[in-house]
């Protein structure tokens, strides 16, 4: 990661040394030819989150793009706003919003037994007076910048990720009797493509480190959540209409900044299925 990879079909401009790159030379509305697909995938693996500008994508093109990378995930709680397209998650905020998607640091749907591998977000409307940036943080670096005794302690531990306190009542639909995913995952997971270790607990979903006393678990999780926010691990992406962000959910956390209320922001996300963390 962070090496200078050779690309033939795309131009890759790093956002910061730690994370992110803007990809030039791709039209995401068209099927990606094999080499270009491979290079976009390599750039994602190398930079953790990649960005594209000026992409016109309808919902079918957006889904086709996601499917090139894997099976599409259907959100376990968010009602499908576009009934014909349950794989499209609508990300929107306006003057009636009480919540927005991702308003604190998280890895998408980490409460699922097999959390998504990645998400592709396309915004068509951005707030007129600025704001609405998304922050992304590198979870390999989060792991590597912990002290060795702390890494040793965390290496063997697992944690509970729970959807209940996040999703119950959130979407204004009757969810009586509905259950939400809850899973136990390693605190430090191994990325299945790179083989590198990354920190996999987040403020949204992770409620408890298994085997520790509650006070110990709370203190260590809070320390880790603060560590994740270290500015040197993070970047900030400024959206324009028709920007696309594609993040690797296994090694990235993100936070959508809601600093533009009551203005509108709108887009669609497709989410790609992933594997059970190990
Ligand atoms: O709106 C954004 O920038 C990101 C929303 C979010 O956190 C998500 O889609 O998971």
Image (cartoon, helix red, strand yellow):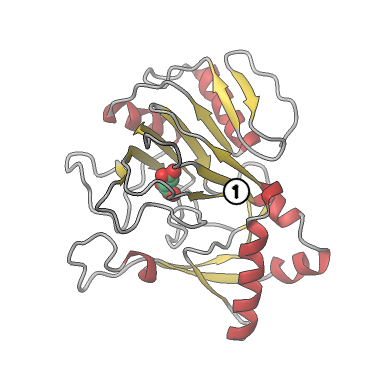
The foreground one among 271 and 204 is: 204
Query: Which quarter of the figure has residue 4?
Result: top right
The residue lying at 28 percent from left, 30 percent from top is 59
Secondary structure found at label 1 = loop
Instruction: Give how far across and how far down residue 238 sits, in percent.
Output: 51, 35
Determine the residue positioned at 20% across, 72% down: 176
Mark 1 near ligand 1 (CB under 8 Å)? no
Q: Residue at x 48, y 35 (%)?
A: 245
Tell me which residue sits at (24%, 69%) in the image.
Answer: 178
> Above or below — where is 66 with respect to 142?
above
Label 1 packing within 10 angstroms: few (<14), some (14-19), many (20+)? many
- The answer to which of 9 and 242 lies nearer the viewer is 242
Q: Which residue is mark 1?
A: 251
- Quarter holding the N terminus is top right
Q: Position of residue 127 (x, y in %)?
A: 37, 37
> Is residue 185 positioned above or below 195 on the image?
below
Residue 39: horizontal and vertical position, in percent? 58, 23
Out of 152 and 126, give the one closest to the viewer.
Answer: 126
Q: Is residue 142 left or right of residue 32?
A: right
**x, y percentage for residue 157?**
65, 71
Residue 72 is at least partly visible in this image: yes
Q: Quadrant of residue 19?
A: top right
Above or below, comparing residue 31 to residue 73 in the picture: above
Decide if residue 272 is in sight here: no
Q: Residue furthest right?
A: 148
Q: Quadrant of the C terminus?
A: bottom right
């Amino acid at each position: 990661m962070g090496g200078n990879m050779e690309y033939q079909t795309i131009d890759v401009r790093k956002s910061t040394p730690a994370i992110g790159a803007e990809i030039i030379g791709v039209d995401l509305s068209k099927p990606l030819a094999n080499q270009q697909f491979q290079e976009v995938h390599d750039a994602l693996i190398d930079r953790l989150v990649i960005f594209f500008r000026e992409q016109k994508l309808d919902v079918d093109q957006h889904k086709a793009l996601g499917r090139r990378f894997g099976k599409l995930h259907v959100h376990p709680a968010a009602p499908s706003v576009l009934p014909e397209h349950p794989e499209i998650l609508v990300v929107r905020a306006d003057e009636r919003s009480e919540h927005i998607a991702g308003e604190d640091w998280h890895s998408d749907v980490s409460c699922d037994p097999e959390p998504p591998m990645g998400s592709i977000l396309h915004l068509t409307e951005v707030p007129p007076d600025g704001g609405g940036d998304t922050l992304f943080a590198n979870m390999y670096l989060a792991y590597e910048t912990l002290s060795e005794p702390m890494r040793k302690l965390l290496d063997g531990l697992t944690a509970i990720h729970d959807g209940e306190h996040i999703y119950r009542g959130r979407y204004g639909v009757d969810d009586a009797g509905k259950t939400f995913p809850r899973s136990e995952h390693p605190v430090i997971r191994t990325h299945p493509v790179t083989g590198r270790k990354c920190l996999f607990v987040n403020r949204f979903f992770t409620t408890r480190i298994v085997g520790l006393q509650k006070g110990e678990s709370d203190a260590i999780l809070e320390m880790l959540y603060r560590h994740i926010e270290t500015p040197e691990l993070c970047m900030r992406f400024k959206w324009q209409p028709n920007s696309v962000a594609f993040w690797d959910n296994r090694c990235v956390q993100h936070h959508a900044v809601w600093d533009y209320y009551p203005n509108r922001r709108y887009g669609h996300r497709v989410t790609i299925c992933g594997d059970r963390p190990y």
